[in-house]
Image: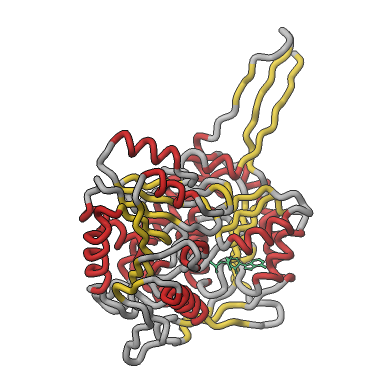
């Protein structure tokens, strides 16, 4: 069992009152580690450390900052297996997915390390011959970073990479159920040479820590990934100090299969997209719309593939679907399934918890329900579980109308072999991310992010540096 502490100003520190919280394995209920239950005092200390470290960090060259950020990425790859095992133990996903998440996290660090070197300013032609206008792009300052449990390493890498590369310093508060991966990254950050105070990580009470981070005058930005509900709450609190915001919130992705699609490719993509992390991702398909001509074939193939998946603890070789994160998550999936069945949904496979010997009751069978209608919970709420709700459509117009009929706007997917339709539909979908014949769109070089109630701000690509820099202009009279 691991005993880990907060990382504040380069030191490992317990909560001032010694309070701790346990981290448990969702597959077995075993205690994996113990971390501090920190509160306001630790949050203030972490902000003070980040603020103190800022001037020296921002004055380094971008290449210099990039070198240590790159080294952190390299060290994550060096320790990939160890980090992946830890991630699986606290979060539950199959080990192969955890290994993939560590590479994915490192790719964001590597990308940001390079992109920080290309934060250019401008010189604007001025209004008078003796004047010059210089536009500088500067780091925003101390960034508060609050992350969710579904990607305990990647969500942090996606934020600290560009924040630090831009010359900001950071205080990270990881999700309370998955703090070990975050603290393990902190250990590697020290080894990589990230100076004391540049990256601080504190675990504990979300509300108390959040309150301090958002009200502290030294914090200039909040970068948050999590639910729309909490995002909205934090945005209200961030109003007091007029913090800059990056908000990666919930999604409710439509997955459209047109009559001219490559059905086998669409089935394989739906399976991978829907079952990754047992359906606990903000970009996984929540609503599957299939053209009536190909509906039966698609549903039969997807149901067969889903029922063949192997459930088990993430560390067990061959496991394809792990447990859900906690009891409330399973209860929500059960509630959505029951609601659909009560309203005329037809169960094609799954539909209940899987009881596995000696393991927790958090495993849910991959489930496909057809005949889904708009009055079902599936249609409006994020299920966050291994369930594919399917509905047949008759026309492109109908599919697009259904797809856009959501307050969310993060990811969307569609499958077609008609090139004109591909462009038409991609342009019409009201989402930040469109997967066209592609259900794995996330990558470090692309601007991940949503519209509408899925938030704003972009993570990845050259665009990400905008989120951690601000413009200043110098009006210069010669
Ligand atoms: P999820 O549904 O993915 O758990 P949440 O939005 O509940 O998403 O949580 C995302 C992150 O926000 C976690 O780190 C959690 O601890 C944090 N969080 C939740 N409530 C608050 C709050 N009131 N103040 C600050 N952080 C919070």
Q: Residue at 34%, 53% (x, y): give it.
A: 439
Q: At which x and y percent is residue 472?
A: 69, 32
Work out whether residue 456 or residue 200 is closer to the camera in this orientation and state it.
456
Query: Residue 460: x, y in percent?
Result: 47, 46
Residue 102, percent from left and from top: 39, 61
Q: Which residue lies furthest to the bottom in this view?
A: 358
* Numbered disc total: 0
Q: Is residue 402 left or right of residue 390?
A: right
Specify the farthest residue to the top.
129
- Is residue 431 found left or right of 104 in the rendered image? right
Residue 87 visible in the displayed image: no
- Identity of the residue drawn at 34% across and 64% down: 99
Query: Is 124 left, or right, of 424 in this rendering?
Result: right
> Which residue is at the front of the view, 394 or 66?
394
Residue at image coords 39%, 56%: 104
Residue 108 visible, this orientation? yes
Q: Is residue 250 above or below residue 334?
A: above
- Find residue 101 and report its horizontal and vertical position in percent: 38, 61
Quadrant for ligand 1 reads bottom right
Query: What residue do we see at 62% from left, 41% from top?
Result: 469
Colour option used = secondary structure
């Amino acid at each position: 069992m691991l005993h880990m502490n907060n990382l504040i100003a380069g030191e490992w520190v317990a909560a001032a009152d010694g309070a701790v919280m346990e981290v448990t394995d969702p597959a077995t209920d075993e205690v994996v580690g113990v971390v501090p239950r920190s509160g306001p005092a630790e949050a203030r200390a972490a902000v003070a450390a980040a603020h103190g470290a800022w001037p020296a960090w921002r004055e380094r060259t971008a290449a210099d900052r990039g070198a240590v950020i790159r080294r952190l990425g390299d060290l994550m790859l060096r320790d990939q297996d160890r980090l992946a095992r830890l991630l699986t133990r606290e979060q539950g996903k199959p080990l192969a997915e955890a290994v993939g998440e560590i590479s994915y996290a490192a790719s964001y660090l590597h990308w940001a390390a390079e992109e920080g070197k290309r934060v250019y300013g401008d010189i604007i032609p001025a209004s008078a011959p003796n004047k010059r206008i210089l536009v500088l792009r500067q780091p925003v300052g101390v960034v508060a970073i609050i992350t969710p449990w579904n990607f305990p390493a990647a969500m942090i890498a996606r934020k600290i990479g560009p924040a630090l590369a831009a010359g900001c310093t950071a205080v990270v508060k990881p999700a309370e159920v998955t703090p070990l991966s975050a603290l393990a990254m902190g250990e590697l950050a020290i080894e990589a040479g990230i100076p004391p105070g540049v990256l601080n990580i504190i675990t504990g009470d979300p509300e108390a820590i959040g309150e301090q981070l958002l009200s502290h005058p030294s914090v200039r930005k909040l970068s948050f990934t999590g639910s729309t509900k909490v995002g909205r709450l934090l945005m209200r609190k961030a109003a007091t100090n007029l913090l800059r915001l990056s908000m990666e919130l919930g999604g409710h992705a439509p997955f459209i299969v047109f009559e001219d699609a490559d059905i086998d490719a669409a089935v394989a993509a739906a399976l991978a997209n829907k079952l990754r992390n047992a359906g606990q991702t903000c970009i996984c398909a929540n609503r599957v719309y299939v053209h009536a001509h190909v509906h039966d074939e698609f549903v039969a193939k997807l149901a067969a593939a889903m029922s063949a998946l192997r459930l088990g603890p993430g560390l067990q070789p061959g496991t394809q679907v792990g447990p859900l994160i906690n009891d409330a998550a399973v209860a929500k999936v059960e509630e959505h399934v029951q609601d659909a069945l009560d309203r005329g949904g037809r169960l094609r496979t799954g539909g209940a918890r899987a009881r596995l010997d000696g393991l927790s009751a958090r495993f849910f069978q991959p489930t496909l329900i057809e005949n889904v209608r708009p009055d079902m919970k599936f249609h409006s709420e994020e299920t966050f579980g291994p369930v594919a709700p399917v509905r047949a459509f008759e026309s492109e117009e109908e599919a697009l109308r259904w797809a856009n009929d959501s307050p969310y706007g993060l990811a969307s997917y569609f499958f077609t072999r008609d090139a004109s339709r591909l462009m038409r539909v991609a342009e019409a979908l009201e989402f930040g991310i469109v997967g066209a014949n592609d259900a794995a769109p996330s990558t470090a070089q692309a601007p991940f992010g949503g519209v509408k109630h899925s938030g704003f701000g972009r993570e990845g690509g050259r665009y990400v540096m905008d989120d951690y820099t601000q413009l200043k202009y110098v009006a210069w009279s010669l």
